[in-house]
Image (cartoon, helix red, strand yellow):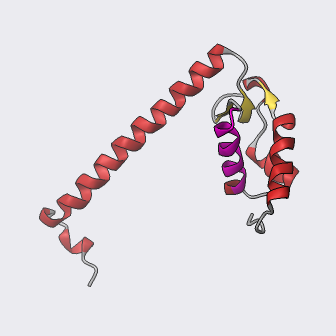
Amino acid sequence: MASPKMTKVHKERIRKALVIFLGKGKDNATTSQTLQSQYNIGRRTLQRIIRDLIRDGYPIASVVEGGSKGYYITITDAEFEEYCAQLSSRVRHDHERLADFKRAYKGKKSNPFQSVFRTS
């Protein structure tokens, strides 16, 4: 869903409402779809607002597997540790993917399937 350019006032209202509306604790996570629908915003806009709230000191985490899926405000040390581990794993996998991509691109010049990579 593409959302129109949001005014600063509108964004601030959504930020304040999100802090109140978001579930406290992992078991009360709120799905991205629910939040997008509730505030009539797109996925990327929601992600930016959540990221801004985290920068402002709100410990908002997300869960993507298990019974609860969505965003929530972290309230226990266990949730904090679990989310930190989840983010660390993502960073590690992204770093590995970046290294593989660089290796693949740099290796294309000596690749026996070089014709696949030609742009002309």
Q: Is the C terminus in the top left, top right, bottom left or bottom right quadrant?
A: bottom left
Drawn side of residue 82 relative to residue 62, left or right? left
Q: Identify the residue at the far bottom of this view.
A: 120
Residue shown at 81%/36% (left/top)? 19
Secondary structure mostly seen in magenta is: helix
Report which quarter residue 54 is drawn in: top right
Residue shown at 19%/67% (left/top)? 113
Residue 55 in the magenta stretch? The answer is yes
Drawn side of residue 91 relative to residue 71, left or right? left
User: Over which residues does the magenta segment extend?
Assistant: 45-57
Drawn side of residue 75 relative to residue 116, left or right? right
**Which is more toward the observer, 116 or 30?**
30
Counting the numbered discs, the total is 0
Drawn side of residue 34 relative to residue 54, left or right? right
Residue shown at 72%/28% (left/top)? 67
Q: Position of residue 43 (x, y in %)?
A: 70, 54
Q: Position of residue 49 (x, y in %)?
A: 71, 48
Residue shown at 73%/20% (left/top)? 75
